[in-house]
Structures are given as C-alpha cells and as structure tokens.
Amino acid sequence: MTLRTKFTDIMGIDNPIVSAPMGGSAGGALAAAIANGGGLGLIGGGRSDFEWIRSQIECATSHSPKPWGIGFLSWALLSETLHHALEFGPSAVMLSFGDPRAFAPVVRASEAKLIVQVVNLDEARVAVDVGADVIVAQGTEAGGHGGTRSTLPFVPAVVDLVSPTPVLAAGGIADGRGLAAALSLGAAGALVGTTSAAASSTLLEVLGGRPATPGGHFETSFSTNGAAVRSTLRPIRRRGPHIVRRNRVAICGSCPSGPARALI
Ligand SMILES: Cc1cc2nc3c(=O)[nH]c(=O)nc-3n(C[C@H](O)[C@H](O)[C@H](O)COP(=O)(O)O)c2cc1C
C-alpha cells in the first residue's frame, strides 16, 4: 500500500513518512529500514563527526537501494562535512536549528532536495527565502531541540505561510492516526523522531538504558520488557519525559518492510 502526496512525488518514495535525523542515534540501519518501508530515512549527522557519518551512510546504502537522506544541526555543521556527505549522493539534506543560509545554496547546487526544519514563523520565512524544497514544522511536542508552539496550531500556520512548498508535520506523531491528523492539517507527510527512536534499528538501543550523555542533553531508558522507551530531553526545556508505546512502528524497526509501512 502506498500513500501519495506532494512530498512523496518530490522524493520519489511511496509513503509520506520521514524518520528524524537524530544526531548519533538515527544511523544507517534505521534509515535503511524506513526506506525499505517506502519512507525516507534521515541519518543523524549531528555535530559533523564525519567518520561516523561515513560509516552510517555505507550502512544505509548497503541495506537499501532506495533514497536516503541526512540531517545536520545548522549551528554545528562544518562546510567540509556537508561537502563530504553530498559526495555520497543523498536524496535529501535536512538543516535544523540554526541559520540555514550559509549551507542552503550548497545543498541546492547538488542533486539533493533541501529540507529545512523550523520551530516558528520567522524561521519558516527564512526557509522559503533559502529555497527549501520541503519545510518541517516542528511543534513543541517533539523530542530533542525545538520551539514553543504546539504541533496542532503550528502546522497549519506554516502550511498557509509557505504554500505551495510542502510541509511535514513533526512533534508527537507516533502512529497512523497522527499521520492522518497531519495530512488533515494540510501537511504532506510527517517526520517522526521519538517513535523511531524506539525501533530496534536505532542506535539508542545499544545504550541499554544507560544515560546517553551522562548529565548531558538527554537520557533514554527502555523498560525491562522492551515495552516502552522514555527520553528525558534537554533539561533546559523543563518538560516531562517522552514515553512511546512500543507500537508497530517501533517493532518493525528492523523488519524488511520497515517502520514506515507500519504507519500506513
Ligand atoms: C533523541 C532525539 C534526538 C534528536 N536529534 C535531532 C538532531 O540531531 N537533529 C535534528 O534535526 N532533529 C533532532 N531531533 C528532533 C527531530 O528532528 C524531530 O523534530 C522530532 O523528533 C519530532 O518529534 P517526535 O520526537 O515527537 O517524533 C531529535 C529528536 C529526538 C527524539
């Protein structure tokens, strides 16, 4: 089964699901699993550790012949790393959290589609100005870094502002109902992070429930029966823990059909 939107047409994929480029935890196995399910998997380029990035790109491309992408934190991205990554021929590069203006022209000069993640309307305007092919509207329900506006009102505000640029909704989307809601809001798909972090192909799992960064940005724990993943992200945001039930998306993380298929 496929679900066609403007986003799937742009990317040449079957389903409007993207796995978030969670730095250091969204590796090549997750990207390949999402791709094999018909979605788009983004490797988490994080803070530009290129040797790690190279190994994950090789993992993704050796496990799936389908399109893959990579995401970077704009504030931490090195121009050299972006150029190296582009040499591997990603179908998409996503820029988040920081000013994309220095890097957008480089991506646009390549074959990769430019995806820009935004957390407020000013950032959405910048994303349009730099020529983003796709804009991710990230609501405050999202795991990881982010803004303060909730997904439900933020997504349609961005859709209206940036039309006809396709928008992906992000923040709290964890199953097919969430995807349906995102489409109802005018989005052309959804980007999921916390839920795909629960997939068996995520690199977070190898941490075995220990803090990913002791005393640092986030902690992740898995229940003893594998039924839940809980991330306490960036204490600075003073939010409660994120809990993801181990639904079909998570369970299918390393299945041949992939988690993207499970959302449809
Ligand atoms: C553990 C974790 C790490 C993340 N790291 C990044 C990152 O390095 N770069 C990025 O663009 N987004 C990152 N994000 C945010 C995602 O891009 C996305 O906005 C978010 O996960 C969507 O909301 P959800 O977690 O409710 O699905 C991260 C999210 C999580 C849960």
Image (spheres, rainbow, N blue to C red):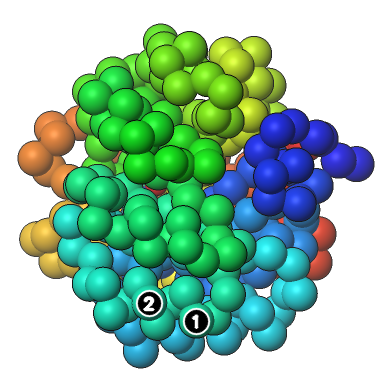
User: In the shown orientation, is residue 8 left or right of residue 55?
Assistant: right
Q: Position of residue 40 (x, y in %)?
A: 64, 54
Q: Position of residue 252 (x, y in %)?
A: 71, 56
- Image disc number at residue 83: 2
Circle 2 SS class: helix
Residue at figure coordinates x 47%, y 87% from the top left: 55
Give the image quarter of residue 141: top left
- Image disc number at residue 87: 1
Quadrant, the N terminus: top right
Please say if 59 is above or below 150: below
Does mark 1's beta carbon lie closer than 8 Å to ligand 1?
A: no
User: In the shown orientation, is residue 245 left or right of residue 153?
Assistant: right
Residue at figure coordinates x 44%, y 77% from the top left: 85
> Residue type at mark 2?
His
Residue at figure coordinates x 35%, y 42% from the top left: 130
Q: Residues within 10 Å of mark 2 (few under 14, many from 20)?
A: some
Residue at figure coordinates x 58%, y 47% from the top left: 18
User: In the shown orientation, is residue 42 left or right of residue 252?
Assistant: left
Please say if 83 is above or below 33: below
Q: Nearer the viewer, residue 104 or 37?
A: 104
